[in-house]
Image (cartoon, rainbow, N blue to C red):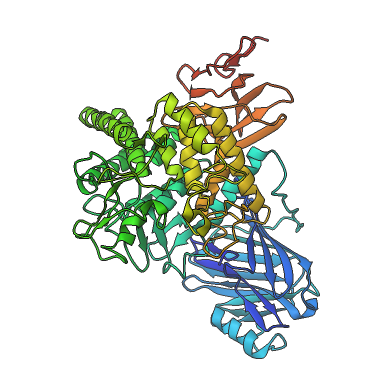
Amino acid sequence: MPAELRHFASGLIMTPVLYAASENNVSLLMPGKEVSFGPRPIGEQSIELDLGVSGTALNWLYTRQDGILGLDWETRAFGEWGLRFWVVLCFHGGDGARFTYDRNTNTLEGTSGGYRLRVCSGKAPLMATFHDNLDDLVNEYREKGYFYLASRGTEGTFAALRFNLEEAPDMHVEASVVPADAGHVPFPAIAAVEHSDPSSGPVAQQALNAVHDVMAWNHVHDFINGRPYTALSRFWNTQKFGGFGVWLDDILYNALCWGNFREDHAVDNLDAVFAHQTEAGNFPCLVTGYDAWDDRTQPPIASYVIWTLYQRSGNRSLLERYYPGLLRNYRWWWDRRQLGDTGLLAFGTSLDAGDGLYKGTKLAAKDESTMDNSPLHDPVPFDETTGMLLAADVAVNSITVIDGEVLALMAAELGYADDQSDLAQRVETHKQRIADWLWDEDREIFANRMIDGSFVPSLAPTSFYPLAAGIGTPEQVDRMIARYLNDEQKFGGEWVLPSVTRDDPAYVDNVYWRGRIWGPLNFWVHQGLRRAGRDEDARTLANKSWSLFARNWQHRLCGENFSAETGDVHDQPDTDGFYAWGTLLPALTVSEVMDFSPWQGWSVMRPAEPDVRIGPLQSPVGPCMVCRDRGDVWWVEHAEHGTVFVESNVRGRITQLRLGSAEPAATLPDTMQEDEWILFPSHDPKPA
């Protein structure tokens, strides 16, 4: 329940319940049409929701300051007389929890697990009632309505403070939880809190805020395994997956996005993945409360994610902790997914592993690609004796090259010289096989190729993934961009990138990977363009990705996928409206200001708009703001104490930035002009 708050140390829970007498509707505000997820600003000092129950609309805002939790609600629209619409704040949970309500002081107090709770509201509730549990309260409303008084009381194990919208259309409530032996904690003067405007400010800041909002709303506690992680979507977690769902690459992308803000939340997601690594070495494609797909995995992006987190923080323990499992997973791919004697990899389902749904079927092998129903798989034979799809896939081969490259970097950093040498040799051999066997000269693009030597007719944006792996001559890249990326009959157009070319027969299906737009596809193509030195094309893709996202974000929709024709999320039923990896689209806009990658290191670029401050963004020197004045001068400063680390008027991208205790350094763009300059003020301040 997204509006419910839990205090984990004490076990205390606050559950809002809304009751509309017109429909005898008792709402627990489960994810769905009654709840719209509002802003959760960076720093997580506030949480905002819009609630709509039986025609009544409320803005709901939590704030946190100096250990005090604030709740404000504001009625935006009445679906019925406010007298008949009730807002109920329920307090419960914890071993031995007990609550008392004092009508004279309008204060609810409680104890649980060695902590004390105190709650006070700007206007007293119309009554306080006490129950056995939440079901008891819900059933009372449904069976007896709001005139029933027998549950009114002053103490018990489950307390409910009841307000109606006639008396309290707007309300401010404050609560504190402190150790039981703490002294008296006075409340500050009760005052309303202004609501935030999520659509204001520079585009890059809007994009950064959007990434944080979606990550924060989907970051939940998995009570089955006793750990926090970021769910694919709050809408799926309980009903669809039996309490938790670790879909491999989705959770890893969540870790990547959290890297902008909080390494601890990124690690929560890494731990959720590594907890299920199999003895064979692979990370399962999916693990839920119901099932485990140990027979298949997904493209190996974990090394890339962990290396970028390491670049942001310099936290060597990340490498020490995860490198052994990453190396086992890399070797698993070569042990279990080689396609004959091609020297390349294919997707499959291991017939001797687990007993997950679809195991041993072509569908299971397609699951491994993440692109389950893509037309890329339609003509590919499935070998039932080996569980293999008999085609070398451009995406998994390219990403496995990146996996090997990054593992070699990790091995060098950790001092594993033999591993580094072996990995470097494997990577170079693998790159050459991709270049030789997956380039379709007739169509002038990289393409999936079946074991009989014929190319798969359909093309996806994955054809650009070799660029992210450092594969492709400048001439090949030019031809691919001109013939496919910018062609409106292929991958070009207003809304990009469709998951199959627009002239493919499967495009009109407009279902999942048959024509719709997906964040991960845009992400890896953007990385490829950046690595290939096509910065203008990368910037164009980032800008179009933001336009697509912003079109829907004005309605607080972050799509699992999007229509390539209209740009809409909900033009058909097979998509989720608040899906975590949809944030990869606005993340591209953020990366155009500041980014980390294995091939460009820490990179920074002047914000596109003047007179802005973008951040805070995590970096090796702490949380930083990237700022620009009203002209061409821009700088990077510490978000808390204002120390300026870099100051410049360079218009291109600065890469391989190194700051800290050592001599600062950066690689400047080839396009740098004579009038452009860069300074490192904190290391060598300007003369007075």
Q: Quadrant of residue 313?
A: top left
Q: Is residue 221 left or right of residue 555?
A: left
Q: Quadrant of residue 652?
A: top right
User: Residue 383 at what x, y percent from top left?
Assistant: 23, 57
Total marks placed: 0
Q: In the image, is residue 112 above or below residue 347?
A: below
Q: Quadrant of the N terminus?
A: bottom right
Query: Which residue is at 56% across, 84% downward?
Result: 136
User: Residue 78 at what x, y percent from top left?
Assistant: 78, 72
Q: In the image, is residue 604 above or below residue 131?
A: above
Q: In the image, is residue 389 above or below residue 261?
A: below
Query: Which residue is at 68% across, 78% downward?
Result: 19
Q: Quadrant of residue 562?
A: bottom right
Residue 152 or residue 290, whichever sits in front:
290
Q: Is residue 326 left or right of residue 44?
A: left
Res. 154 in view: no
User: Residue 536 at what x, y percent from top left?
Assistant: 57, 29
Q: Quadrant of the C terminus?
A: top right
Q: In the image, is residue 455 above or below residue 646?
A: below
Query: Which residue is at 47% across, 38% downward?
Result: 525
Query: Which residue is at 30% across, 60% downward?
Result: 362
Residue 480 or residue 8, whichever sits in front:
480
Res. 114 in view: yes
Residue 280 or residue 571, whichever sits in front:
571
